Amino acid sequence: MSGGGFHVHGPHDHELEHAAQHGSHGDSHAGGIAVVTAIIATVGAMFAYMGGATQANAGLYKNNAAIKKTEASNQWNYYQAKSSKQNLSELAIELAPESKKAFYTEEINRYKKEKADIKKDAEKLEAESKEWDKKSDDEMHQHHRWAQATTALQIAIALAAIALLTKRRWLEYGVYGVAGLGCVIGALAVMHI
């Protein structure tokens, strides 16, 4: 630029102005793909977190199911011990003198009552174990949905890199399609479908 108001453009000034206003030649979509890729990566990170959380929950629920199953087994063993004692008392009635028969009859009745309570507790614990198993299975199903959604978004990110390198417009559409599929699967995970 010279004094006196006369301005001379350099050979690249026009290109710089055009690039600033409209993007540079051939890279007009590169910035857009970069932004979309960052968004996809962010959503993918959230999906991966949810996938990990549901997998951890499934493990915890399965552990709770195993604990309840063990407690139910302990109750059934206790029930069996009471049954054995009841059987011995029934045998003792047949062998004991008349003066002891009333005692063994009371013992038999006591064991029957105790067994009924123990059986109720064991069945309750078995039902709780089944509930925890179902919760675990539901969490694993949801985990698989999150994993599928995350995988689709990772594929979309890989396609975005290829699209940027090859400058193929149809690959850009593939990015949007696969990312959309990942988001739909993520929505299914949110809805527990």
Image: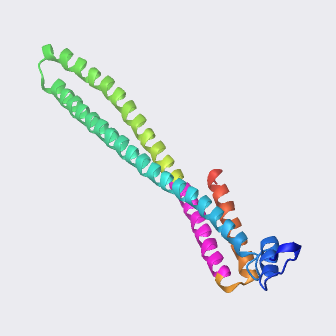
Q: 87 or 167: which is nearer to us?
A: 167
Give the percent coordinates (x, y) of residue 18. 82, 76
Check the picture and name the quadrant holding the C terminus: bottom right
- Which quarter of the figure has residue 115? top left
Inspect the magenta stretch and tell me whether residue 155 lies in it: yes
Which region is colored magenta? Answer: 140-164
Q: Is 24 included in the stretch rendered in magenta?
A: no
Vertical side of 45 occupied by 172: above or below: below
> Which residue is the extreme one toward the front?
4
* Residue occupying the point 32% across, 38% down: 71
Query: Which quadrant of the structure image shows residue 65?
Result: top left
Residue 145 vs residue 57: left or right?
right
Q: Residue 79's spot in the image, x, y percent? A: 29, 34
Q: Is residue 126 above or below residue 173?
A: above
Can residue 50 be seen here? The reply is yes
Predominant secondary structure in magenta? helix
Q: Quadrant of residue 88?
A: top left
Evaluate whether residue 137 shows in this view.
no
The quadrant in which the N terminus is found is bottom right
- At x 31% / y 35%, what residue is drawn? 75
Find residue 32 and report its horizontal and vertical position in percent.
72, 70
